[in-house]
Image: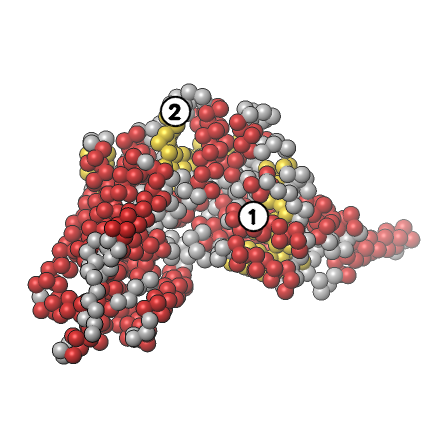
Amino acid sequence: MDIALTILVDGLIYGAWLFLVAIGLTLVFGIMKILNVAHGALYAVGAYAGASLVGGYLFATPPAALQLPLLIVAALGVALLLGPLLEGVLLRLFYGRDEVVILLATFALSLIIEDLIKQVWGVYSYYVSEPYALFGVIEAGPLFYVGYDAFLIVVAALVGLGASAFLRLTRQGKIVVAMIHDSEICRAMGVNVSRAYLWTFTVGVFLAALAGALIAPTLAVTPTMGVNAIILSFAVVVIGGLGSVEGAALGALIVGCTRAATVHLWPEGELFIVYAVMAAVLAVRPRGLFGMPEGRKI
Amino acid sequence: MTDQRLSLSLAAAIAASLSLAPVAGHAQETFKIGLVNFLSGPAADAFGVPSMNGGVLMVEALNAGQVPAPYDGQTGIGGLPIEFVQIDESGGAQVQIQRYRDLVEREEVDAVLGYDGSGDCLAIAPVADELQTVTIFSGCGTTRLFEEASYDYVFRAGAHTTMDNVALAHYIKRTMPETKTVAGLNQNYSWGQDSWRDFTAALTLLMPEVEIGPELFPEPGAGQYGSQISVLMRAKPDVVHSSLWGGDLEAFLLQAGPRQLFARSHVVFNMAEHVLPRMGEKAPVGLITGGRGAVGELRPRTELADWFYEAYAEAYGIPAVQGPFRFVQTILALKTAAEIAMAENGGTKPTDEEIAAALAGLVFETPSGTVEMALADGHQAIQGAAIGIAAWNDELGRLELTEVEHFAARCVNPPAGVTSLEWIEGGMVGAECE
C-alpha cells in the first residue's frame, strides 16, 4: 500500500473520530454561544453507558446484531437523562452572563461528571471490544485495517451530512440557523428560544455520548478518556470556525491527515503539529476557515 | 514444686515481662504513616488504587501478625500498631508539596510512603529533607532523583527505570538473537523518552548489529494509535519496544491486536504486566513484558510472595500486579529499618535520624524478592527483574505470563558511584550476569 494512501486512510480514521466528538461541541457553541468544556466528560459518560450495556457488565453480552443499536440506545439514554437536567437546572442560571462565566461553569461541570463517573463505575477500565470485530479485518498490502474503523468513517459522514441537511432543508433547521445569527431577533419573531436551547443542548449531549459509545469498542473506557478528546476537538472547531458543521468536518479532516502524515514522515513533530496547524489557520483567518464576521448591532 | 522448677518459672516470667516491656510501655502509642498514591486521574486505575489496596492489606496484616517470615515476629512496627492516613497523589507537584506538609505538620505522621509520579518525587524530596521526615518512594522511575542530588531522609525502595530496559535488552539478546531491527513506541514525556534511551543504549551495546527505527513518540493520553500501528506494520521491525501504561497501553493493545502487529513483530513492554489480569482474553497472546521487578505472576515463588499474591486476590477479587508489589516494599523497608533502630536504641520508638541510618544500605525481603538499598549511598534500591510471554491458560481461563526469564539485580542495575547512562554507555562494566 502506497504511503500516501496509508496516510490518507489513517487520516480519515482519525478525522472521523475527531469529527464525531467535535460536531456536538460546535453545534452547541454556534446556537447557544456556550463553549461546553464538559463535552469531553459527556463523551466519557456515553462510552461508559455503551460499555455497560454491550460489554457484559450489566447484562450478558448481547448478540452481534444488537450491539450497535444498543450503543446508540445508550447514547440516547444519556442525552435524555442529562441533556434536559443540565440545561434546565444548571446552564439556565448563567444565560445572559459573560461567556467566560458559562465556560467556567461547564469546566466545573466536567470535574463533577468525572468524579460521578468514578462513583458510579469506579476507577478501573471498562472494555467493550466485541463490536470492534463486527466488520472483520481488511487486508491492504502490508497492512491490516479493522472494518469497524471504516464503519466509523461512514457514521461520521452520515452524521455530518444529516446535520447539514437538517440545517439547510428543514424548517426547524432554518430556525436554528437564524438563531445562530441572532437569537434576539428570533425571539422577537416568536421563536421559542428557550425550548430550542433545551433541544440543542440535548442534541449536543447525544452527539457527545454517541461519539463516546461508538469509540468505546476501540479503546479502554477510563474516567479521563475525554480530556484529550476535548482538547483536540477544540482545535478542530477553532480551525473550522466555531459553530460551523462544515468547518468541523474540514477541520477534522485537516487535523487527521496532517497528524497521520507527521506520524509517518516526521514522528518527532506529532506532539505539536495539530496546534501548529491551528496557529497557521488562525493567522490567516482569525475566525477559522468557515467562521463568519459578526454583524454590528445598532 | 522443686526449687529448680521454681527458679526456671521465675526466670521465664521475668524474661517474658522484659520482652513485653517495650510494647507495654507504648500501649497507647502507634507508628503513624502517610500512604500516598494516585486515587484519581489517569494513573489511578493502573497504579494508584491497586497500590493503595496492597498497602492497606499489608499494614493490616502486619498489625494482625499475619505476614509470613521473615515478618512473623513482632506485630506492626516493633510491636507498635501501624496507623495510616491515605492521600491522593493527583493534582501536580505543588499540590503534593502542600499535602506533604499537611501530613508531616498537622497529621504528625512518623514517615511518608508512596508516590508514583516522577515529578512528584523530585518535588517532594527536598521538602522531606527540610522537614527531616523519613520518606520512602515506591514507583517513580526517574534516575534523576539520586543521580542529580542527594538527600538524608529520602529513599526509594524500588529500582529505577534503567533496570527495566536493560533487562529487556538482555532478554532480546538471550531469547531473540536473530533480531536485526528494533522500533520504539513510547510516550512523549520523561518516562517514555528515558525508557527508550536506556533500552536503545543497552541493546546497541549488547547487539551492535541491530538497526534502530522508526522511533515513535505519541503524546500521553493519545488513545488512538492507528497511524503509529501503520508505521510499525510498514516498517516490519523484528522487535517493537514500548513503555506505554494504563489506558493508553490498553487502547494500543486493543487496536494493535486485530491489526496483526503481534503476529508480525515481537512487541516487548517494560511494564505491561499490570493490565493483563483485567484485560483477560482481550490482551494479545504473545505479548512480552516485564513488570518493573519480579512482580505479580513474575514473582519469585517464595512463601512471602505467594502469601501476598493470594491474600490480595482474596481481598480484592483480582490478582496483585506491580503497583501493590512495589508499594508494599516501602512498608517492609520501613518496618525492617525501624525494628533495627529499635533493637539498637533499647526498644523505644526510633527517631527519623535512627530510621534513616538503618535504611541506608538496608537489605530486606519483599514479595518481589530480596531488595538491597545499594545505590546513592544506600538510598536507592536495586532488585531483580523478570520478563515473560503472555499465553492463554485453558485451565485457569485467563492469560498468564509463561517462559519467565529472571535477571539478577546486579546484572541489570548500575553499580554505586556511576550514573545509569554512563554505566550503559561505558559498556555496563561490573554487571554480574550469569
Q: Are marks 2 and 1 on the same chain?
A: yes
Residue at the limit of the structure toward the right, as seen here: B3
Q: CA distance from mark 2 to mark 1?
A: 34 Å
Is B90 located above or below residue A80 in the figure? above
Q: Tell me the tag on residue A146.
A: none
Query: Which residue is tagged 1?
Result: B122
Percent coordinates x, y for residue A291 in the rendering: 21, 58
Residue at image location 58% in from the left, 25% down from the top: B429
Secondary structure under badge 1? helix
Q: Mark 2 or mark 1: name the one nearer the start of the chain.
A: 1
The amino acid type, in three-letter code, at marker 2 is Glu
Name the outermost residue toward the front: A298
Task: From the viewer's perspective, tell me whether residue A279 is left or right of residue B294.
Answer: left
Q: Position of residue B220 (x, y in %)?
A: 39, 47
- The answer to which of A27 and B68 lies nearer the viewer is A27
Going by the numbered disc 1, the residue's amino acid type is: Leu
In the rendered view, does B178 fall on the left or right side of B385?
left
Using a 10 Å C-alpha cutoff, classify the residue at mark 2 as few (fewer than 14 neighbours), some (14 to 19) or many (20 or more).
some
Question: Does residue A149 appear to the left or right of B420 in the view shown?
Answer: left
Asked whether the beta carbons under mark 2 and mark 1 sit within 8 Å of each other, the answer is: no
Question: Can the viewer see residue B370 in this picture?
Answer: no
Q: Chain of mark 1?
A: B
Residue A188 image position (x, y, % from top left) = 16, 79
Residue B211 in sight in this render:
yes
In this figure, which residue is indicated by the disc labeled 2? Answer: B211
Q: Secondary structure at mark 2?
A: strand
The residue that appears at 29% across and 36% down in the rendered structure is A264
